[in-house]
Amino acid sequence: KEQGMPEQEGKRIELLMMGLFGFAQKRREEYYLLKLVTRSIQEEAEHSASLQDYLRGTFFWSRLLSAYVRSPRDRKYMRDLFGPLVRESIFENADLDLESDPMQIYRASINNEELSTGQRSRRNPDISREEAIRDPETRDLFVSHLQDLRDICDHFFILLEETLPRMPYGLRFIAQQTFNTLVATFPGESQQHLLQVVGHWLWKAYLAPALTQPEMWGVIDRGLSPIHKRNLGEVSKVLGQVYAGRLFGGDHIYLQPLNTWVGEAIERMEELLVSLIDIREPEQQFDIDEFNDLFARVKPTLYIKMADIFAIHHLVTNELSHLSDSDDVLREIIRELGSAQNNENEMMGVGSNEISLQLTPKFHDKQDPEADLKQLFMETKRLVLFIIRIQAGANLLEILVRPITPEDDDKWFALLDEEALHQRSNPRAPSAYSGMMDDEPASTLLDITSMSYAEVKSAALENILILEQQGKVNRHNQYQDLLNAIAIDIRTKHRRRVQRTRELDGVRATLTQLDSKASYLDEQLQSYNDYIEQAMITLQNKKGKKRFLLPFTKQYNHERELARSGRTPKFGSYKYSARSLAEKGVLVSWDGYDATQWNRINVTISSDEVGVFHIEGSMGSLMIPGASASVPLDDLLQAQFDNHQFMNLFRGTGGEGGLKLNVNLFLHLVFKKFYREE
């Protein structure tokens, strides 16, 4: 439960947790994230004094759920559910108005009347709501608005019924587990009421945000107008009342005419919720169990930044007393890791790049003493699969004891040749002699491709005898258990391929969304830059009235000299003595020149390119070597934004030293001379 947690800290921990679970982009990580969320719900419910206490709580798991459901992988469902509703009922209906407040309807009617006639309406705009609803035109519009509102909400339930089987499994699983937890924790509450609690949570956490902000959830690809937002808000208000399981009361008196429909919709919603939580177990859905990591041919990999590792270490260390008992294995891990601060100091030089960690079930060995036996069983299944491709029989035992003929050897070597040819023509295709039982490449001590068929049968028989001694197979059923296991593996392999395809689709959807967002942001940035550049050109091109210069002044002579030589900058040039700039506060110091020399030194500030200012130093008619620099306006503004009081020019260019300027006063001078409208 969140208690006084700063928003920034909560967001940081949320990102750490989602990163730790790979943002649930793969089935293993999604499975464990869902287990974490549902376990958190169970813990919070068990520590709540009552159902009301639980409902008033603000829980951290809701942050994880919010991040989980925003995955681009699951946005397709939102488009399927809300897309037709928003497009057909809201966007394509230009005249739609779902306003349910009679006063607003009355005043809008007056405005429309005055706009169409060009004359002031005779109706008084300052009346009560009771008087407004008695206005015939207002009453007709009010009834029409409520009918449209009811029809659109009806459309939502039709779409929900059609798309319910496609609702993301993870969300349905969390809803199911929340309901089961509440039923077990609060037996005094009716199951119907608890089902409504789950429905209201589903609405607030998942459905309502996508309905009221469809452009943020991928439902539509354009922004909302104020009338669209208001109409969606009215739809959300009615559907929210349905999911809350309550009729409209005195706070929404003008929506009470919908109460008959709301009552029917509540019953409809409850039936949908029963179907929503009727799902299979997550182990079946994700084809995973607690031993998967132990026997996986390819170990799971975690991609994480060093800074995140240290942050998690700090977090776990600080909360260790709340996370584990005194004999928990987590404490042993923390002791082995040592001080989080010391580890961070030692690894400071590694950098902040992402690293990959192969995860190993270090503490799992003692929980599964049959690891070797399971590996042997897996190896035997592979051998048997090859054997039954060469010889046939009534049962496996008959095939195993059948003598090998020269024809069988020929079939075996033909299979090997066929496989070798297949591998040469399709080097990336999976081998028929590796990974037959799993999606992953095989890791076996037996190189079957170099064995004769007799050696394959001999190895299989030896393994089967060991398995029989351990009670894993039985010759009384002709070792049918092995064939059953192979059949299950084949079905599992197909399911895993489907799952992997789903994961790949999720990754592709994520990349597509990211590419689309990147393109959009690039376009926005380019549009912004173009606008800024055009604005700067417009500002610098503002000439106004021609300035009057006193004859024979420094600026008068400077402009005449530039005009005679044909070097007049496009946006102007201004010449000052160093003393004058110092008195304005612009010039702070100039290495190599003391204040007594500033009367003889001139500084010219000119601009021949939009947003770029050229600064030159001269003494008399001679340029000071190296005293030349170009300063973009962006650099000046960035220095001001970074709270830099001074900036240095000419340093390291071979000149007489560094020119130190006051950033704010130099900016003021630039804006005054180059961007003012005279």
Image: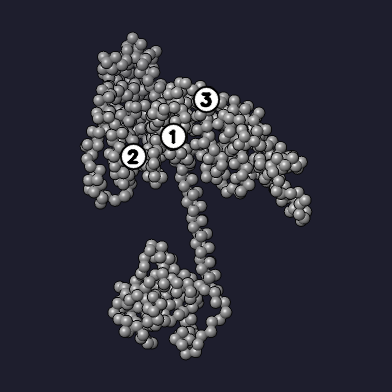
Residue at (35, 18) in percent of width and height: 482
The percent coordinates of residue 540 (x first, y second) are 52, 72
Q: Which of 345 and 527 lies nearest the eye of the viewer?
A: 345
Residue at (49, 78) in percent of width and height: 572
Regarding mark 2 in the picture, which secondary structure is present there?
strand
Are there few (<14), some (14-19), or many (20+) residues within 10 Å of tag 3?
A: few
Amino acid at dot 2: Leu
56 versus 224 height, above or below: above
Describe residue 117's horizontal placement relative to residue 146 as left or right. Answer: right
Residue behind mark 1 = 57
Describe residue 203's horizontal placement relative to residue 261 as left or right. Answer: left
Q: Report how far apart the C-alphas of labels 3 and 2 lie in the structure.
A: 42 Å
Residue at (53, 84) in percent of width and height: 548
Regarding mark 1 in the picture, which secondary structure is present there?
loop
Mark sitting earlier along the chain (3/2): 3
The percent coordinates of residue 26 (x first, y second) are 41, 36
Q: Report how far apart the C-alphas of labels 1 and 2 lie in the structure.
A: 32 Å
Mark sitting earlier along the chain (3/1): 1
135 versus 621 height, above or below: above
For residue 429, which quarter of the picture?
top left
Residue behind mark 3 = 193
Amino acid at dot 3: His
Q: Are marks 1 and 2 in contact (CB under 8 Å)?
A: no
